[in-house]
Image: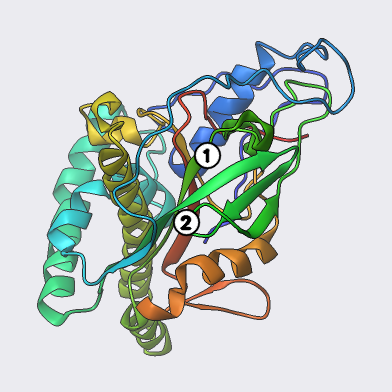
């Protein structure tokens, strides 16, 4: 999973205006969050108007959706024909493949991509399907939960005994946001629900990348590796949509896939290692809940996902949930 780095502004100045049509992936969502926070950066945004680490003003009266099941489920394989439409072509071509616009006009750049890049792209997708180089798979699930300050308590499937808890950082000096605020509090008398997902493109994706690199086929390596990584992100986007549909909140989705890349839907998806949930070691708890080994994904001693073409997330249904920064 790539590290997150959003555009930064000089100290004391708001972030530069960001264009959600050109920014891509999680970095885009974080940059947009920075822009939003620059418009609402009063130090007195906590409940009660105090400057201490109080709870944020996130609404507590939102409906709690009913999940289709509790516990986890494996979907293996997911047809590539469902994954490819969710690939972020901008992230792939400009980011992974480094096909830059340079001094070209927009029309010239689009024409160049159509003539020189698109044929290679389509050929590569066909080869991947023909040779079975990617095997998309998902393990995901729904779990009863409640918040307790900065903690999110996960209960057993019956909603009785606490099973484990996550501790998330809280903003200091801004809106006091914390991931736990998006869930019903333990003293509210309401049981909430949280979803987790883990997706992968399979072991062969890493093996083929290594083979191409060792053979010195650097362009083929760049193209295949880049597409395999973006396919993992595409599957995460696709399955997040599946979760929203299963929770009954999918009707709020933007009609265009590209708008989903900038959070055109209710709720949010947070990957471990990003600002709202930065502790990579928390992935051990996610593996306890989902058992990623069932789809061939392992957690290394450094808390990286293996194979590389994998990503995981905590999924929040709350209508106010958006990406936010901590500092």
Instruction: Name which residue lies at 83% across and 15% down.
Output: 43
- Residue at the spot 77% in from the left edge and 17% down from the top edge: 46
x, y percentage for residue 188?
A: 63, 29
Asked if marks 1 and 2 touch (Cβ < 8 Å), the reply is: no
Where is residue 67 shown, x and y percent of the image? 34, 45
Label 2's element? loop
Q: Which mark is residue 302?
A: none
Q: Position of residue 81 (x, y in %)?
A: 13, 58
Residue at image point 65% right, 62% down: 282
Q: Give the vertical position of 125 relative to 177 (above or below).
A: below
Where the C terminus falls, by quadrant? top right
Is residue 307 shown to the viewer in this render? no
Given residues 46 and 188, the one toward you in this image is 188
Q: Residues within 10 Å of mark 1 (few under 14, many from 20)?
A: some
Please indicate whether residue 231 sits to the left or right of residue 23 in the image: left
- Provide residue 109's location: percent of width, then percent of height: 27, 37
Give 92 or 166, whichever is nearer the viewer: 166
Q: Nearer the viewer, residue 317 or 171?
A: 317
Instruction: Classify mark 2: residues with Cα within 10 Å, few (<14), some (14-19) or many (20+).
Output: few
Q: Is residue 15 above or below residue 187?
A: above
Foreground residue among 100 and 65: 65
Residue 191 numbered tag: 1
- Secondary structure at badge 1 equals loop
Q: Earlier in the sequence, mark 1 or mark 2?
A: 2
Question: Could one spot residue 243 in this view of the protein?
Answer: yes
List the residue tagged with mark 2: 158
Asked if residue 26 is positioned above or below residue 254 in the image, the reply reads below
- The correct choice, above or below, for 292 with respect to 13 in the image is below
Q: CA distance from mark 1 to mark 2?
A: 11 Å
Q: Quadrant of residue 44?
A: top right
Horizontal relation, residue 239 to residue 85: left or right = right
């Amino acid at each position: 999973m790539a590290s997150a780095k959003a555009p930064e502004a000089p100290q004391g100045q708001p972030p530069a205006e960001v264009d959600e049509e050109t920014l891509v992936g999680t970095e885009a969502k974080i940059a947009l969050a920075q822009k939003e926070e620059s418009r609402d950066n009063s130090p007195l945004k906590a409940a009660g108007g105090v400057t201490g680490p109080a709870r944020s003003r996130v609404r507590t009266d939102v409906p709690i959706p009913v999940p289709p099941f509790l516990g986890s489920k494996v979907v293996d394989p997911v047809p590539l024909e469902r994954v490819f439409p969710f690939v972020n072509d901008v992230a792939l071509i400009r980011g992974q493949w480094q096909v830059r616009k340079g001094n070209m006009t927009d029309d010239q750049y689009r024409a160049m991509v159509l003539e020189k890049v698109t044929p290679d792209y389509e050929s590569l997708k066909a080869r991947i399907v023909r040779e079975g180089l990617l095997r998309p798979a998902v393990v995901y699930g729904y779990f009863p939960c409640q918040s307790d300050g900065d903690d999110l308590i996960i209960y057993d499937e019956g909603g009785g005994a606490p099973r484990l808890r996550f501790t998330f950082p809280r903003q200091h000096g801004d809106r006091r946001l914390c991931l736990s605020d998006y869930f019903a509090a333990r003293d509210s008398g309401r049981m909430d629900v949280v979803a987790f997902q883990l997706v992968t493109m399979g072991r062969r994706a890493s093996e083929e990348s290594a083979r191409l690199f060792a053979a010195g086929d650097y362009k083929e390596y760049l193209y295949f590796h880049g597409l395999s990584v973006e396919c993992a992100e595409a599957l995460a986007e696709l399955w997040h949509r599946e979760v929203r549909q299963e929770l009954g909140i999918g009707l709020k989705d933007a009609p265009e896939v590209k708008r989903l890349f900038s959070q055109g839907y209710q709720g949010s998806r947070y990957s471990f290692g990003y600002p709202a949930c930065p502790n990579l070691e928390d992935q051990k708890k996610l593996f306890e809940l989902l058992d990623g080994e069932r789809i061939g994904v392992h957690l290394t001693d450094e808390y990286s996902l293996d194979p590389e073409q994998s990503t995981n997330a905590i999924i929040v249904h709350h209508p106010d949930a958006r990406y936010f920064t901590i500092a």
